[in-house]
Image (spheres, rainbow, N blue to C red):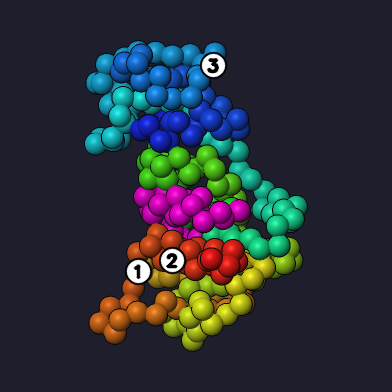
Amino acid sequence: MYLYGHHACEMALLNPKRKIETVFVTQRSTLEKLPSVGKTKVEVVDRKDLENRLPPGSVHQGIVLSVQPLPNQPLDFLGDIEEPNQRVIVLDHVNDPHNVGAILRSAAVFGASALIMTERHAPKESGVLAKSASGALELVPICVVSNLAQGLKDLKSMGFWCVGFAESGKQTLDQIDLKGKIALVLGGEGDGMRRLTQENCDFTVRFPSADAFSTLNVSNAAAIALYDTYKIQTKI
């Protein structure tokens, strides 16, 4: 697969878990702005060559990496983290790679331990997702589970409180205790969380909003949820 754009490629080069096969650049001087490529193969090519490797309209900034996808992180690694206050994001049928990339970016900014998605109805790792994440794909572990309801139960067994977001929520985020291990669960746009997902949440909350309009893009909702949880857990 191909990663492209300065931030996504820079963070990939800094990630020891990322296997990089070839670095493609339009100008060798581009390498001076990036971390050392070591012994990785470098090819200087024209812009047309880069564009032919990528989806139409991709903003590559003269740099493309040919890489192997990152390995899936097993969910149980969270049980080994000793930090008492943790944040993870759980996505239920969020399909758009742009949204997932933006959520990864917020997860990195607010120190989330992981992003959890399902095998189906979720985007695969891709250059589009990585570009939207602006490098955060290399920082936030992604756990892919086959059954989300079971995944939530596994999180609970590790001490996480599962907080789901829905317009029907009777409470707002500031009305519940956000100390400790918190899993923030968001559903796809349109349908929101599925019934079984919601039933496995300890709390269902909503965002306070103006009367005229009450829905947020899922990536915006994730950013607000992460910020509010981070603020309380770090006592800002």
Q: Position of residue 4 (x, y in %)?
A: 37, 31
Which label's residue is closer to the chain start, 2 or 1?
A: 1
Q: Is residue 106 magenta?
A: yes
Of 26 and 56, nearer the camera is: 26
Q: Is residue 83 left or right of residue 33?
A: right
Q: Which residue is mark 3?
A: 38
Q: Position of residue 7 (x, y in %)?
A: 40, 36
Q: Is residue 57 left or right of residue 171?
A: left
- Where does the N terminus fall, quadrant-wise? top left
Which label's residue is closer to the chain start, 3 or 2?
A: 3
Dot 2 falls on a residue whose secondary structure is: helix
Which label's residue is closer to the chain start, 1 or 3?
A: 3
Q: Which residue is mark 1?
A: 216
Residue 198 visible within the image:
yes
Q: Is residue 80 above or below residue 11?
A: below
Q: Are marks 2 and 1 in contact (CB under 8 Å)?
A: yes
Q: Which residue is mark 2?
A: 224
Dot 1 falls on a residue whose secondary structure is: loop
Dot 3 falls on a residue whose secondary structure is: loop
Q: Is residue 200 above or below residue 148?
A: below
Q: Is residue 211 above or below residue 221?
A: below
C-alpha span from label 3 to label 2: 39 Å
Q: Is residue 85 magenta?
A: no
**Which residue is drawn at the image coordinates 35% and 79% (left, top)?**
209
| Extent of the magenta region | 91-113
